[in-house]
Image: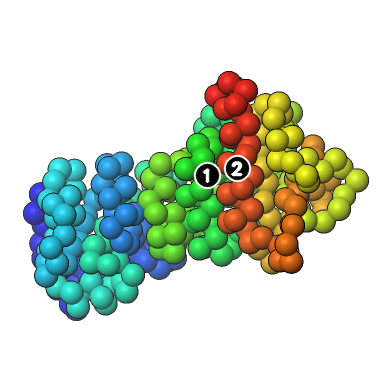
Amino acid sequence: MKGEALREGSERASKLAFYASKAGWKKSGKFLVEGPQAVREALRSGLAEDVYFDESLNLPKEFCEGRGAWFHPSSPRALEKVSKDCQGVLACASSRKLERGFSSLDLSGTFVICALWQVRDPGNEGTVIRSCDAAGCRAVLLVDECASPFNPKVVRSSAGSIFHIPFFKCSEKELLSLKDRVFLVSTSGRDFDKKVLVDSSPSVLEGLGSMVLLFGNEARGLPDRLIKESHAVARIPIYGQAESLNLSSAASILVYDAVRSQRMKGEI
């Protein structure tokens, strides 16, 4: 469906810029989706409501016309004013259609869930969501004060994976309520009395059944209280001279290994 053209300084352009702000996505229930890959996934999921494309570019038809969304030809300057990272195409989508209550988390069968505790870097959070989607994790838990999944940097770095994998905001109490049903594994580079599952071989993740892999804040890691509540601690060995791996790299390694282990045992 062809929509109204987007022009610089228009009321519509102001609204789009508002959707990119924290106040905007909270108040309006809409958020901005920037760039071809993320917009494509928003369209495929049926969650893109309005798509804005640079009319001066020779973009694929999927960004300029189709069903289920309004397509708005836009001047390059209008798009530039709204987003410097959209590469000629952006969309707005409903955040409320993606929000889920913790009680609806699917705990059937065998699975891997990735939990992030107070992860506030939107680039890291979005990259972890993308890795979890690619690995086939069941869900991502955003524990306590994580970056909003509707932050444009999260959406962009997830490359559209926020439209695929379920994510749930939850409290520490809700996270720990899962302990009786799944194996809770904290991740840390520090030494603890608990058994370290991943040291010389990641294959020891095999046979644990359903598990939640818990990752901490980029700067501070996980607090001791959460590690003590966990069933075990996972640590990735460092064979070279690097002090550590960043959060998104560590999460990618562990979630892939955990899901691979389950697949090799025929559990999923």
Return the mark for residue 84.
none
Number of numbered discs visible in the structure rendering: 2
Amino acid on which disc 2 is placed: Val
Tell me if mark 1 has few (under 14), some (14-19) or many (20+) residues whose alpha carbon lies within 10 angstroms of its own.
many
Q: Quadrant of the C terminus?
A: top right
Would residue 20 appear left or right of 147 to someone viewing this image?
left
Q: Position of residue 106 (x, y in %)?
A: 54, 29
Callout 2 touching callout 1 (CB < 8 Å): yes
Looking at the picture, the colour scheme in use is rainbow
> Looking at the image, is 203 positioned above or below residue 91?
above
Residue at screen point 64% across, 53% down: 250
**SS at mark 2 in the image:** helix
Residue at screen point 71% across, 26% down: 207
Q: Position of residue 54 (x, y in %)?
A: 16, 67
Residue at screen point 87% across, 42% down: 194
Amino acid on which disc 1 is placed: Cys
> Looking at the image, is 108 positioned above or below residue 7?
above
Closer to the camera in the image, 73 or 193: 193
**Mark 2, residue position:** 255
Q: Quadrant of residue 89?
A: bottom left
Residue at screen point 63% across, 61% down: 246
- Seen as rendered, the residue at the extreme front is 240
Q: Is residue 31 visible?
A: yes
Q: Which tag, 2 or 1, sits closer to the chain's start?
A: 1
**Mark 1, residue position:** 132
Q: Is residue 70 visible?
A: no
Q: Position of residue 77 (x, y in %)?
A: 19, 78
Tell me if mark 2 has few (under 14), some (14-19) or many (20+) residues whose alpha carbon lies within 10 angstroms of its own.
many
Would residue 203 appear left or right of 114 to someone viewing this image?
right
Q: Position of residue 91 (x, y in %)?
A: 26, 58
